[in-house]
Image (cartoon, grey):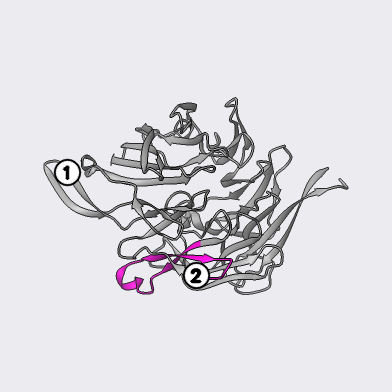
């Protein structure tokens, strides 16, 4: 038997649609309908949240108003994403609501939680004066949430020659609380000897099998001088353990499905050659042992699927452009699969049988406006499958695809250029991977 792909439009593009996501049980789909692109602050857009049945399309939840839809222009990775997040049991969805007085006091938003079983929507007990919640992570048990907050003032010392300037700046904080926001506590306390450094909280992710949180902290002293750390937190005893430190830059990591390993890359800020810039590591959180898989090569952003032993890597191609590679986690052997073009944001299927990436063409405009099209690639081989219809395209900022939990369905956003309408907006499309018995 061979595989074939069928694509059809799920939601027409009457208004611009963003960021489709399946619930963890695969029964529901959430997406954002854009209502007000923010021209003054180009870090976010305002829209409405919709949740529909994945089979019938019946509306389960409709949140209207000035919802803070996303902060996707920061490359779509890391702690700055303002995205709706599902709980592991598919009962709750967390999202951000904009404060209506943001024009006078600056952009601020609150965290809300919708209960899909009862339809109840509540505001989480995080005062807007104390917390500016960005990314949310729900633990695998569904009992804890991790929050990145920017609402924390920290002493900062700026030194230039003989002059020292002291002031308060807004800095990152990592907050752990119960699923309803109860009993919050701050994880990070910046030491006094670091007050002269610019510090950042990088990626943070829960272990897929237990309530352990790994997170990245960076301290930058100058453009070419910084230090990055990976820590492991046990919220039960509030114990923090240092796993890794390096003078190079770390901004992304990925847990293996069994929770026994973490893959990440470091970037040497002093290297001007993309082929000699990145090093790949694997670390075992429980033992603290780490292995260097590749030393100063062109591979970066390692991602692991829910099943299988292959690791997905983005790659700088020799002739220019961006490709996609696969690394065997057992042998460390790396094979480049996508060798031409400029391809971004590969996403694993949960089964590890395929992945989707976005093929785009860079131009002089900002990268989030580049037209992009989703392409499906099977790990077993074969030519790439273009998911979108021939006459469809969308901006890179809202085209990120999403797999269903069984790996047989892909959601993506695309604009149908064949529609006869003056205002053509990107709509929601669905691709189903089917077994072709007659092939």
Residue at image coords 72%, 61%:
8
Which sits in the foreground, 3 or 155?
A: 155
Quick one: label 1 or label 2, which is nearer the N terminus?
Answer: 2
Task: State the CA–CA distance, disc 1 to disc 2.
Answer: 50 Å
Occupied quadrant, residue 198 = top left
Q: Is residue 263 above or below residue 415?
A: above
Task: Please give the residue where the numbered disc 2 appears in the rendered image.
Answer: 121
- Tell me whether circle 1 and circle 2 mark residues in contact (CB < 8 Å): no
Residue 72 rendering spot, x and y as whole percentages: 48, 56
Residue 340 rendering spot, x and y as whole percentages: 61, 40
Task: Please report the bounds of the magenta region as a residue range.
Answer: 94-120
| The disc label shown at residue 160, or none | 1
Q: Is residue 22 above or below residue 309?
A: below
Is residue 176 a member of the stretch shown in magenta? Answer: no
Image quadrant holding the N terminus, namely: top right
Residue at image coords 43%, 35%:
266
Q: Residue furthest right?
A: 438
Asked if one can make out residue 44 in the rendered structure from this viewpoint, the answer is: yes
Q: Is residue 344 above or below residue 425?
A: above
Which sits in the foreground, 370 or 51?
A: 51
Occupied quadrant, residue 100 = bottom left
Residue 320 rendering spot, x and y as whole percentages: 54, 39
Q: Which of pointers 1 and 2 indicates the residue nearer the eye?
A: 2
Q: Secondary structure at mark 2?
A: strand
Is residue 106 a member of the stretch shown in magenta? Answer: yes
Q: Is residue 435 above or below residue 22?
A: above
Image quadrant holding the C terminus, namely: top right
């Amino acid at each position: 038997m061979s595989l074939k792909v069928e694509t059809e439009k799920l939601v027409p593009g009457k208004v611009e649609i963003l960021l489709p996501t399946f619930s963890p049980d695969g029964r529901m789909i959430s997406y954002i309908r854009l209502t007000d692109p923010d021209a003054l602050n180009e870090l976010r857009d305002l829209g409405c949240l919709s949740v529909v049945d994945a089979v019938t399309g019946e509306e389960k939840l409709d949140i209207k108003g000035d919802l803070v839809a996303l902060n996707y222009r920061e490359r779509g990775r890391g702690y700055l994403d303002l995205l709706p997040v599902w709980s592991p049991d598919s009962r709750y969805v967390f999202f951000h609501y904009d404060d209506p007085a943001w024009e006078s006091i600056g952009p601020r938003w609150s965290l809300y939680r919708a209960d899909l079983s009862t339809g109840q929507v509540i505001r989480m007990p995080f005062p807007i004066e104390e917390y500016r919640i960005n990314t949310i992570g729900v633990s695998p048990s569904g009992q804890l949430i991790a929050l990145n907050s920017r609402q924390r003032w920290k002493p900062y010392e700026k030194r230039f020659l003989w002059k020292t300037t002291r002031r308060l700046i807004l800095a990152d904080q990592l907050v752990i609380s119960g699923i309803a926001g109860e009993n919050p506590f701050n994880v990070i306390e910046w030491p006094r000897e670091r007050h002269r450094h610019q510090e950042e909280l990088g990626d943070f992710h829960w272990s897929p099998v237990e309530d352990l949180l790994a997170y990245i902290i960076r301290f930058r002293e100058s453009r070419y001088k910084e230090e990055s750390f990976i820590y492991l937190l046990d919220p039960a005893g509030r114990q923090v353990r240092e796993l890794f430190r390096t003078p190079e830059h770390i901004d992304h990591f990925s847990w293996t499905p069994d929770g026994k390993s973490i893959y990440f890359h470091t970037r040497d800020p002093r290297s001007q050659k993309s082929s000699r810039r990145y090093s790949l590591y694997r670390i075992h959180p429980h033992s603290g042992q780490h292995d260097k898989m590749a030393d100063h090569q062109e591979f970066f952003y390692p991602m692991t699927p829910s099943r299988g032993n292959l690791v997905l890597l983005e790659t700088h191609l020799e002739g220019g452009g961006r490709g996609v590679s696969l690394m065997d986690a057992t042998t460390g052997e790396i094979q480049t699969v996508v060798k031409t073009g400029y391809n971004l944001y590969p996403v694993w299927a949960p089964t590890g049988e395929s992945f989707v990436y976005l093929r785009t063409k860079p131009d002089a405009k900002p990268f989030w406006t580049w037209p992009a099209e989703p392409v499906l690639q099977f790990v077993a081989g074969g030519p790439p499958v273009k998911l979108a219809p021939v006459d469809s395209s969308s901006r890179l900022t809202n085209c990120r695809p999403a797999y269903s939990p069984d790996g047989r369905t892909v959601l993506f956003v695309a604009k149908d250029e064949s529609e006869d309408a003056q205002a053509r907006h990107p709509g929601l499309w669905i691709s189903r991977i089917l077994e072709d018995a007659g092939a």
